[in-house]
């Protein structure tokens, strides 16, 4: 297994600082790599037009135009707003090999991506916790 170098993120805070800034549930997901219960997230069924920012640092990560209904129970997207918006790491936890998606700016845990997205849109599913994001409606692009 290749060792992964810890990445230096543009926004770096101590866990105590994050804890103070974030609500308990979001802290658990973003900093402790938790997962919200499926079908429970506030953005799972959100169909409004706008931008989803990282809840920890405000980095824009997904646009509603790339959101689709995957039926998996979490907000699902076909791609981020740009490749730099996110960071991808191999995740070997829970006896699975998955690709973890982190915020490209602060390293907060957002979710995972899987190769079962819509075939005509790249075939990738970004499966993201609502608790990791802040939705800003009304943005056209
Ligand atoms: Zn962030």
Image: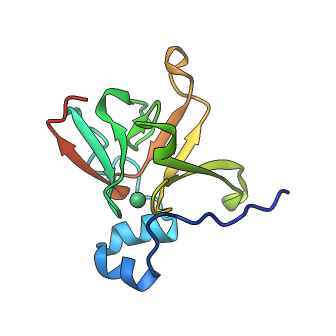
Can residue 46 be seen by looking at this rendering? no
Q: Is residue 74 above or below residue 16?
A: above
Instruction: Give left or right: position of 102 versus 47.
Output: right
- Image color mode: rainbow
73 up-or-down from 134: above or below: above
Identify whether 10 is placed above or below 46. below
80 or 133: which is nearer to us?
Answer: 80
- Outermost residue on the right side: it is 1
Q: Residue at x 31, y 57 (%)?
A: 58
Residue 98 horizontal side relative to residue 57, left or right: right
The residue under the point 20% across, 29% down is: 140
Please state the horizontal and vertical placement of residue 8, each as a whole percent of the image.
58, 66
Farthest-out residue, front:
10
Where is residue 27? Give x, y as percent. 39, 71
> Most extreme residue toward the left, as rendered?
138
Q: Is residue 29 visible?
A: yes
- The residue lying at 49 percent from left, 19 percent from top is 121
Foreground: 130 or 37? 130
Residue positioned 45% across, 81% down in the render: 15
Horizontal side, residue 136 vs residue 68: left or right: left
Residue 94, position as x, y percentages in the image: 67, 60
- Report which quarter residue 7 is drawn in: bottom right
Q: Quadrant of the N terminus?
A: bottom right
Q: Is residue 125 left or right of residue 134?
A: right
- Please tell me whether residue 4 is drawn above or below residue 73 in the rendered image: below
Residue 21: percent from the left, percent from the top? 29, 76
């Amino acid at each position: 297994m290749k060792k992964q170098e810890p990445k230096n993120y543009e926004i770096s805070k101590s866990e105590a600082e994050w804890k103070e800034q974030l609500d308990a549930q979001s802290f658990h997901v973003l900093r402790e790599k938790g997962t919200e219960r499926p079908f429970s997230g506030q953005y799972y069924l959100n169909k409004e037009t706008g931008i989803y920012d990282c809840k920890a640092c405000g980095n824009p990560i997904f646009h509603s135009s790339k959101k689709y209904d995957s039926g998996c129970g979490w907000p699902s997207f076909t791609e981020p707003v740009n490749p730099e918006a996110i960071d991808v790491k191999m995740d070997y936890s829970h006896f699975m090999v998955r690709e973890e998606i982190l915020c490209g700016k602060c390293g907060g845990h957002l979710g995972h991506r899987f190769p079962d997205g819509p075939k005509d849109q790249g075939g990738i599913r970004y499966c993201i916790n609502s608790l990791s994001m802040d939705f800003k409606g009304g943005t056209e692009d």
